[in-house]
């Protein structure tokens, strides 16, 4: 080994050193533990679980204090086999495509990532549009926010969830924009992981809401 080559090796300026210490090695998979964005999202979701637990507690307390439930004039108004079932299926599918996007970026497949995150973003918007349309149908049938405890609890629960879905759509939009700019890779995708956790959370909350409001006798 010559003196020059020995210097290149020890000072880290040779080709091998550059390959070992390139920008990609400082990202998601090179460090141990949970990253700050993901930890922050997990803590936020924990607080949201407690928030929705309080709303469900208020719902069941109100339900127990009023009989019959729903009131006779609203019996059959909330049809689980109507438009809301299609909206539910769409939201569940969006959670699947969101996870497919996460899996794609983990393996460095940016094309599949962009395709799936775009579909997730669009499905989230479609869900919100369908929920707004369903609200308009319910308004026409007399079920409004001020239609007694039944109307108040229904629109409080679904309204807050809709607000969370809207926040999730904005989050997905930011991820989509950053993905278009090429900011994510197999080792730099914490924001994608964090957004997917939140999206899965709103999906699970809706499944519980749908079961309680539409399927529970």
Image (cartoon, rainbow, N blue to C red):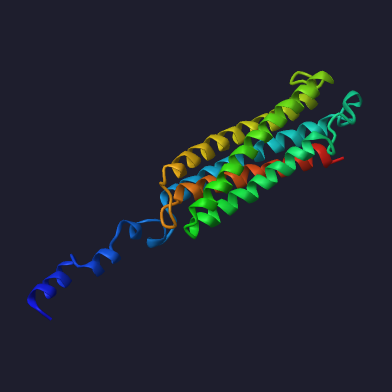
| Residue 199: quarter of image | top right
Image x and y of residue 159, in percent:
67, 29
In this rendering, position of residue 104 left or right of residue 71: left
| Residue 129: quarter of image | top right
Q: Residue at x 46, y 42 (%)?
A: 180
**Relative to the observer, which residue lies in front, 157 or 174?**
174
Q: Against 172, is 138 above or below?
A: above
Q: Against 47, is 152 above or below?
A: above
In this rendering, position of residue 127 left or right of residue 214: left
Residue at the extreme bottom: 1
Image x and y of residue 171, in percent:
52, 38
Which quadrant would the C terminus be assigned to in this image? Answer: top right
| Residue 210: quarter of image | top right
**Relative to the observer, which residue lies in front, 65 or 173?**
173
Q: Residue at x 52, y 47 (%)?
A: 114
Which quadrant would the N terminus be assigned to in this image? Answer: bottom left
Residue at the extreme left: 3
Residue at the extreme right: 72
């Amino acid at each position: 080994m010559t003196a020059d080559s020995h210097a290149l090796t020890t000072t880290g300026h040779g080709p091998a050193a550059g390959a070992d210490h390139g920008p990609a090695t400082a990202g998601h998979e090179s460090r141990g533990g949970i990253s700050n964005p993901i930890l922050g999202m997990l803590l936020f979701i924990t607080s949201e679980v407690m928030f929705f637990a309080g709303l469900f507690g208020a719902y069941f307390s109100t339900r127990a204090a009023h009989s019959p439930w729903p009131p006779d004039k609203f019996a059959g108004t909330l049809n689980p086999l109507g438009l809301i079932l299609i909206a539910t299926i769409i939201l569940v599918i969006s959670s699947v495509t969101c996870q497919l996007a996460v899996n794609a970026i983990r393996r460095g497949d940016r094309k599949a990532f962009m395709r799936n995150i775009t579909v997730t973003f669009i499905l989230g918007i479609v869900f919100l549009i369908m929920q707004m349309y369903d609200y308009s149908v319910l308004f026409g049938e007399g079920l409004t926010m001020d239609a007694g405890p039944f109307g108040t609890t229904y629109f409080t629960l679904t309204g807050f969830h809709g607000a969370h879905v809207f926040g999730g759509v904005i989050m997905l939009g930011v991820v989509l924009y950053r993905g278009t700019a090429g900011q994510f890779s197999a080792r730099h995708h914490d924001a994608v992981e964090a957004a997917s956790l939140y999206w899965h959370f709103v999906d699970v909350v809706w499944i519980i809401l749908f079961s309680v409001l539409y399927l529970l006798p």
